[in-house]
Image (cartoon, grey):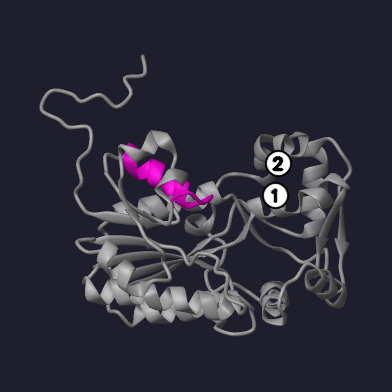
Amino acid sequence: MGDHGGTTTPGGSEETNLVNIAVTTPTGNVGSRVVRLLVQAGVRPVVLLRDAARLDAALRGRCEIREVDQGDTEAVVRATAGIDTLYWVNPPTDDDDPLAGSIRMGESAAAAVRENAISRVVFQSSGGAEARSGFGEIDGLGRTEELLDATGAHVTHLRCGYFFTNLLLDLESVQAGVLGTTLPVGHRMPWVDPRDIGDVAAARLLSTAWTGRHTLGVHGPADLSFAEAAAILSTALDRTVVAEEIPEAEAAEAMRAAGLTAAQIDAALGMFRGQRGFAPENPRALVTTTPTPLSAWAHAVLRPALAG
């Protein structure tokens, strides 16, 4: 029962690529999980990232690393030559208008798929992308879905819920016992652990059983309101956390004071604004529900982050 560290067995090999799989944002919350699972499945994935030094040192010898800026279309086309299957994430950009930046990344992906005849794409989209408008920055993901659909490749769009890891972006507020939102604190929506998204993505990348265009919700174990999330965090963190609705105008002013442009503010607020009255195209069901509860993630990840 010892750990053999992936040693080869007679007649076998440690890494057997049945397909050439490329993964973008391999150091992100989702991408890092995808890469690790592919390696554990015996695949040597191609990873696309700006700086190879950022990749986990333990993975570098088990991946083919191609340094590339995803916004450089010609470079992305070159970097994806010979790829059969692509996991694509639109990374954040420095564009004054995040929506335009997201669409620019989608155009880069679509060009690579067309030019290299990539047969299969799994795209990390979001709940709300199906609306195509009214969801701020998520509208860029909706446009990317359309661009990838137009390539004729087999495509699965993962319509992900609200990342648990978003809480790490507001540690100071959580530390002070406040979970702020511009949504009504009783509004429920899917909350999901990014690692679970990685599990779904890896399974989809490794499967050749599906063809055509698909959308797949990745909803976490339960829909939660911010009030319910605050109660869960209170228990997991052993401190009182209260949900608080923040007026949009107040949130916008805070963002403006932090140096965000008008387009960046609108893109950020729009992601929550679109949630009002929204029902996902992919409802909660067996295939859209993932296992990790917020309580477990908060205890394992958020609690140490607050302590540090």
- Left or right: residue 33 compared with residue 18: right
Q: Please report the residue visible at 23 percent of the width from the left and 75 percent of the height from the top.
A: 115
Tag 2, which secondary structure?
helix
Residue 196 is one of the magenta-drawn residues: no
Residue 284 location (% of width, % of height): 57, 62
Based on the displayed image, in which of its 4 quarters is residue 25 positioned?
bottom left
Q: Which residue is mark 2?
A: 302
Residue 180 location (% of width, % of height): 82, 60
The furthest residue to the bottom: 133
Q: Are marks 1 and 2 in contact (CB under 8 Å)?
A: yes
Q: Which residue is mark 1?
A: 168
- The kind of secondary structure the magenta stretch mainly shows is helix
Residue 37 location (% of width, % of height): 38, 42
Q: In this rendered view, identify the residue nearer to me: 226 or 35.
A: 35
The residue stretch that appears in magenta: 26-40
Tag 1, which secondary structure?
helix
The furthest residue to the top: 2
Q: Is residue 33 above or below residue 244?
A: above
